Image: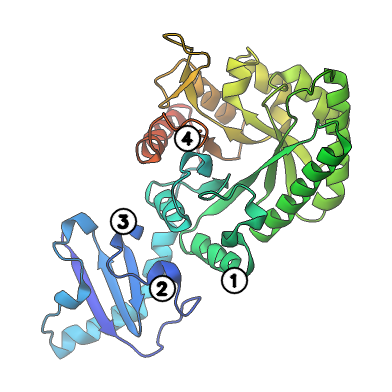
Amino acid sequence: MVITIMRVIFLNMISFPGKSHSLLKPLSDLDLYPRGFWIMGMELIIILGLKSQIPNPNPRCVMSKVSRREFSKLCVTAMSAPAIISSIKREKRLPIAFSTLGCPNWEWKKIVSQAAQLGYSAIELRGVLGDMDLPKSPQFTGEKLKESLNDLNALDLKVSDLGASTRLAEPAPDKRAAQLDEARRFIDLAHKLKSPYVRIFGGNLAQGQTIEDATERIISGFRELHESARGSGVTVLIESHDSFTNSPSLLKILKGADLPTAALLWDAHHTFAAGNESPAETFKQLGRFVRHTHLKDSHPPQNGEKDRRYVLTGTGDVPVKETIKVLVTNGYRGYYCFEWEKRWHPEIENPEVAFPHFANVIRQYLAEAGFKE
């Protein structure tokens, strides 16, 4: 590939949102984009190519003599830079996402830059570094919130949903109040981040609690949260998780709530591994409620292990490929989200391995399933 580096001095000829966008500052940090642009002071540097192909990625070391005609051409190129940038931003991506549960040691800039580089369209926010209570995270408060939104917009990324820890089946009054308060705060943040969903759990049954009592409490919780969610553009999703991993238990909740702000996050791993259902069986009963997905693979316990072990997509016995086929065939229009539970299982592969692997495998699965934009 021919590497072209253009360095043009200009005076307010081109306007970009934000005077010093944090993602566009460091000229040496060229790995933010596979090919892109950087701004420093009043200079525009457009670099077409890959970092690995540039011996010395310092624009100050690549000055060359140019004729007046060549300089004029460069100025015209600079004036058209917004169109170039726009075309880079709008490269079509498949509707795939990853949860930040899979990259617990990545800071915000790395999360968004890696998502864009690997071809993901969205990010599911389930903690950033040590902050699991996202509405209290410095990254999403005050001026930092605006900066985070600018970062997402610059890379044409969406927030697919926010993952709260709320458990609506909680029977203890004081703990239940705290759970509902958390969910409301997450709904408010989702609205600010222009994210359509907040994930909550039903939860495990408390000691002596019946499934019927838990179900009624979850339905009641959905109704309470409806008052906060309606008009905000945010829908609350219960995940197939904990004591609610099969279709009958989830169907009772969703039909009982019967609200436009209540729907399902289908963790297809759990309905298969814990609910003992095939993807087709689950979708037949719950498909009309599915708004978001969690996809991951695992294999049964081996060598004395107590639980299933998460493995790279396509190497376990969870029917991920079949799940994709079911979703595509039935016209699902949400994100295919990779929930790699690295935060809870530090022994599994690092995100640098798992995230690109998932993206490549799911592209293949989507193509084979006949996915079309």
Q: Nearer the viewer, mark 2 or mark 4?
A: 4
**Quarter holding residue 27:** bottom left
The local secondary structure at tag 3 comes to loop
Q: Earlier in the sequence, mark 2 or mark 4?
A: 2
- Examine the rendering and report whether any part of residue 259 can be seen: no
The local secondary structure at tag 4 comes to loop
The local secondary structure at tag 1 comes to helix
Q: Residues within 10 Å of mark 2 (few under 14, many from 20)?
A: some
Q: Earlier in the sequence, mark 4 or mark 3?
A: 3
Q: Are marks 2 and 3 in contact (CB under 8 Å)?
A: no
Q: Nearer the viewer, mark 2 or mark 3?
A: 3
Q: CA distance from mark 1 to mark 2?
A: 25 Å
85 lies left or right of 266: left
Residue that badge 4 annotates: 342
Q: Are marks 4 and 1 in contact (CB under 8 Å)?
A: no
Measured as percent of width and height from the top left, residue 65 is found at 10, 84
Residue that badge 3 annotates: 34
Measured as percent of width and height from the top left, residue 28 is found at 27, 67
Q: Residue at x 72, y 25 (%)?
A: 286
Give the label on residue 143, or none: 1
Q: CA distance from mark 4 to mark 3?
A: 26 Å
- Examine the rendering and report whether any part of residue 361 can be seen: yes
The local secondary structure at tag 2 comes to helix
Q: Nearer the viewer, mark 1 or mark 2?
A: 1
214 lies left or right of 87: right
Where 302 sits versus 172, above or below?
above
